[in-house]
Amino acid sequence: MGQRMLELRKQLRLTQDTLAKIAYVTPQTISTAELGTKAIRLEIILNIRAALDISTDYLPRGGADCRK
């Protein structure tokens, strides 16, 4: 999940700080999610999903088409 999030964030040319602001989380939360160092709450995953404008199942499952 973290790798997909990192790749998409970079494709969109967003910094961790910028994505954190858009998703209403801390930059540390984005870093933790990308590194996969601990479990991320569903609420936070949904915020990140909304900020990246991707389908709900893209982060946990992947797939060819991530856009909603």
Image: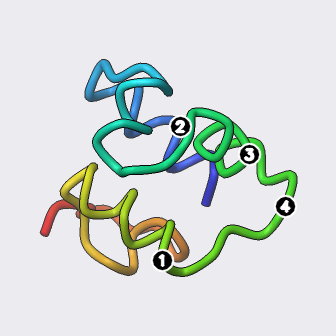
Q: CA distance from mark 3 to mark 4?
A: 7 Å
Residue at (26% x, 28% y) in the render: 12
Q: In the image, residue 33 lies at what x, y percent? A: 66, 51
Dot label at residue 38? 4
How packed mark 4 is, by other alpha carbons closer than 10 Å (few <14, some 14-19, many 20 or more), is few
Q: Position of residue 9 (x, y in %)?
A: 39, 34
Whichever of labels 2 and 4 marks the residue nearer the N terminus, that label is: 2
Q: Residue at x 57, y 33 (%)?
A: 27
Nearest to viewer (mark 3 / mark 2): 3
Residue behind mark 1: 43
N-terminal-most mark, 1 or 4: 4
Q: Which residue is mark 3?
A: 32
Disc on the earlier residue, 3 or 2: 2
Q: Residue furthest right?
A: 37
Q: Pointers 1 and 2 in contact (CB under 8 A)?
A: no
| Dot 1 and dot 4 residues touching (CB under 8 Å) | no
Task: Check disc 2 and report the residue beneath it.
Answer: 6
Task: Kindly state the secondary structure of the residue where label 3 is placed.
Answer: helix
Closer mark to the observer between disc 1 and disc 4: 1
Tell which of 26 and 31 is nearer to you.
26
Residue 22 image offset from top left, x and y in percent: 28, 42
Q: CA distance from mark 3 to mark 2?
A: 11 Å
Disc 3 or 1, which lies upstream in sequence? 3
Q: Mark 1 Cα within 10 Å, few/some/many (few <14, many 20+)?
A: few
**Amino acid type at mark 2:** Leu
Task: State the separation of the CA atoms marked 1 and 4.
Answer: 15 Å
* Contact check, label 3 and label 4, Cβ < 8 Å: yes
